[in-house]
Structures are given as structure tokens and as C-alpha cells.
Amino acid sequence: MTTAARNIAILGSTGSIGRSALSVVGESDGRLRVIGLTAHSRLDDLCAQAKQFQPPWLVVTDADQAAKFDWSEKPAKSQLLYGQDGIETLVGQPEIDVVVAAMVGSVGLRGAWRALEAAKTVALANKETLVMAGPQVMELAKARNAKILPIDSEHSAVFQALQSGRREDVKRVILTASGGPFRERSSQQLAEVTVEDALAHPTWSMGPKITVDSATMMNKALEIIEARWLFDLEPDQIDVVVHPQSIVHSMVEFRDGSVIAQLSPPDMKLPIQYALSYPERWECPSPRLDLTEAMQLDFEPPDEERFPALRLGHEVAAAGGTTGAVLNAANEAAVQSFLDGQIPFTEIVPACRSVLDGHHFEAKPSLEKLIELDGWARQEVTRWVCT
Ligand code: NDP
Ligand code: MG
């Protein structure tokens, strides 16, 4: 039986996830069709993607870059829109079935929000959306009967493992973490880490922000919070284990002690494709697990002394309210300050801690309040960097 092609829009098509999503489309035998692509600054790449996939819509979020760019290579059939308004217009298009949310940072929230409002399925890579506004986003999805399917590999693994039992029989989820490039470094060695060191991840090839987040283990902190809201778990039902090979992508433990894991070589095309093919499974261009070759799977407890971001993740998952938006924005600003050479690697997490502790907590904030706090936390990091 053939099913109708799924029409997709990719927000952030020029990024690491966006490009992998397009290779999944390219291998999909016409089962996926691109309706819209969006970019911020890499407009040459956007044009090349548009030539290959011929989408009816293109959006450029950086209007200044768009104004300077030579669009003569753009396919005539692709209509150009600008800014966040352009993103919102795109995701509301009636022919779109699935919106791939793959922008980086809190700028991804509005597009995902609008897509859910329009009752689209959201294939979510932008974990910042759920870290900032998890309860609000999940409530909106429920009200509109819209699905959120995880692209983050750990959450895709949990989503898959959950299908082997009843929800009420879940004891806990165990998120795996590669431990990043500095797993074996002492606290003193961590203080000397350069930007180049932090951008060299041992198992995953990703955009710069999430690569630094993996090095501080803030990525795992954000994923604890993401899991809390996406799967409606209690904070103490989420554990983290370090697994350097990144083959076991996460696990679910059921009441009887059975632990169900999802395994595959580290390649984002598999979780991206599953979010786009769900509930079907298709042949996938990712490399396959070869168990005829000797391999070792190691697991060890995380070290919260050297990687204090993890503690922040557990705290914010438990506190909810305004804490996710504040942590997320403080982290984005602190990572940028590190990448700009303004603060050392080991100051990223203390900057987040300081801003989080200094904010005025609200248990049930509005979306507007969260967006306001996003701006406030960034300013606080700037103040922190300057003092
Ligand atoms: P990249 O930095 O590679 O790509 C980011 C994308 O967002 C690009 O298309 C970029 O456009 C666009 N973008 C950047 N700034 C803005 C802005 N201000 N407004 C609108 N669009 C913007 O990131 P990744 O692909 O690595 O990550 C994307 C998301 O997926 C993140 O939330 C990350 O946490 C998550 N994720 C990523 C994984 C990975 O393996 N990479 C794994 C799991 C989750 P341009 O390039 O044109 O400037
Ligand atoms: Mg992940």
C-alpha cells in the first residue's frame, strides 16, 4: 500500500540538522516533499537547496543579509518571505503536514508555537522550545491535537522504547550522554579549554552552540528538562548515564526491571527520518550497527563536580515555571561569550547559575513573560561578563 507524500517545511535548513533532514528527503523515494526552507545567514546554501528541492516557499530571517544578496539563482517558483513573520506565514500554509523545527536557540520557539497552533505535526530538534516553555507548548499541542515528535536522538530513543510497554508501567528513563570531549579532563584542565578544543566533539558532528553545550554537559541538562515536559515525567524519573560510544541513545526502565534501549551508530539521519516517517519505518541512509565487529559499550555515572550543569538541569526540571527560560537564555548568551573569547569555558555554567539564582521566580508564567525573561537573562549575562 502506498501512502501519500508528506509535505514538510524545514526551519533552519542550512544548519547541521537541516542539511541531514534534506538528505533524508533526498533518499525518501518521493515520500517526503519540501514545501518550505528557511535560513538566517547562509543564503548561498539556501539557494543551492532551493535549486535542488524546488520548494514553493523560502524564508530568510536576517532581512539585512537578504537585501544584499543576489537572488538571480533562486528558482522562479520559490516565493521569498522575510523575518519571523515570514516563518509564521510559512508554517501556517495549509499544504504543510510536518514542520521540522531545526533553528538553533530560543528564536526557534515562535515558529514551533505557530506550527502547533496551526495543528501541524512538529518534528522537534530545537530543544530550547521545550526548555523555555515546556508546559505551555505541551498544552498547546494537546489543545490543537498536534503531535510533537522528537528528533533529539535521546528523546527519539525514549519515544521508541516507550512503545514496548504501558505508560503507567514506566519506572524511569535513562538518558545517555557521550560525556563530550572533556570527559576525562580534571577541573584544572577544564579551565584551560580553548574554543577549538570545545568545538571538537568525539562522536557527533553538530552546530557550534550544541557542540559547546555537549562539552559543558549543559546539553544533557537541557535534555533532562526536554524529557520532563515531552514525556510528562516526574523530575526524579530522569537519570543520566555517561556512555562514550554514543551507540545506546537512551533507555526506558519499566516497573518489572526490564530496560529497553535503542541502539544505532551516532548519525542524526535515523532519528530525523523516524520523526518524518512515524509511525512507519523506512530504509535509512544512516550507517547500520555492525555486530560482527568487536565493540565495547561502556557506561559510567556522570561527575556532577566537574560538570555542574547537570545539577542545574535536575533543579530546573523540578522547579519548572520561569527557570527553564532563564537557564536557556543565560546559557545561550554565556556560550556566545565563550565563543567570542570573553569568558573562559569554566565560567559558562557559573554565569548561568548566577543569573538563575538572581531571577524573580514565577510558577505559572505567560508566554510573554518567558520571552521577556529571555531578553532579561541575556542582559544579565552581559553584565556578569563585564564585571
Ligand atoms: P546549526 O548551528 O548547525 O544550524 C542552526 C540553523 O538555525 C541554521 O539553519 C541557521 O541559519 C539558523 N539560525 C541561526 N540563527 C538564527 C536566527 N537568529 N533566526 C533564525 N534562524 C537562525 O545548529 P544545529 O543544526 O546543530 O542545531 C539546531 C537545533 O537542533 C538546536 O536546537 C540543537 O540543540 C538541536 N539539535 C541538534 C543536534 C545535532 O546533531 N546538530 C542533535 C539534537 C538536537 P544560517 O545557517 O543560515 O545562519
Ligand atoms: Mg541529544
Image (cartoon, rainbow, N blue to C red):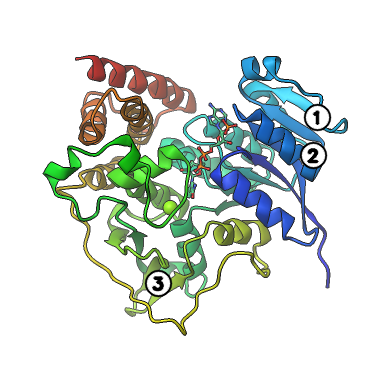
The residue sitting at 47% across, 74% down in the picture is 165
Alpha-carbon span between mark 3 and mark 2: 49 Å
**Residue tagged 1:** 73
Query: In this rendering, is residue 57 above or below 145?
Result: above
Residue 169 badge: 3
Q: Mark 3: which secondary structure?
A: helix
- Amino acid bearing label 1: Glu
The residue sitting at 59% across, 56% down in the picture is 272
**Residue tagged 2:** 51
Tell me where residue 143 appears, x and y as whole percent: 60, 43
Q: Is residue 91 visible?
A: no
The residue sitting at 33% across, 76% down in the picture is 296
Mark 2 C-beta to ligand 1 under 8 Å: no
N-terminal-most mark, 3 or 1? 1
Residue 291 badge: none
Query: In this rendering, is residue 7 above or below 75?
Result: below
Q: Name the image quarter holding the N terminus.
A: bottom right
Q: Nearer the viewer, residue 373 or 291?
A: 291
Tell me where residue 190 appears, x and y as whole percent: 19, 42
Q: Local crowd at mark 1 within 10 Å, few (<14), some, or many (≥20)?
A: few
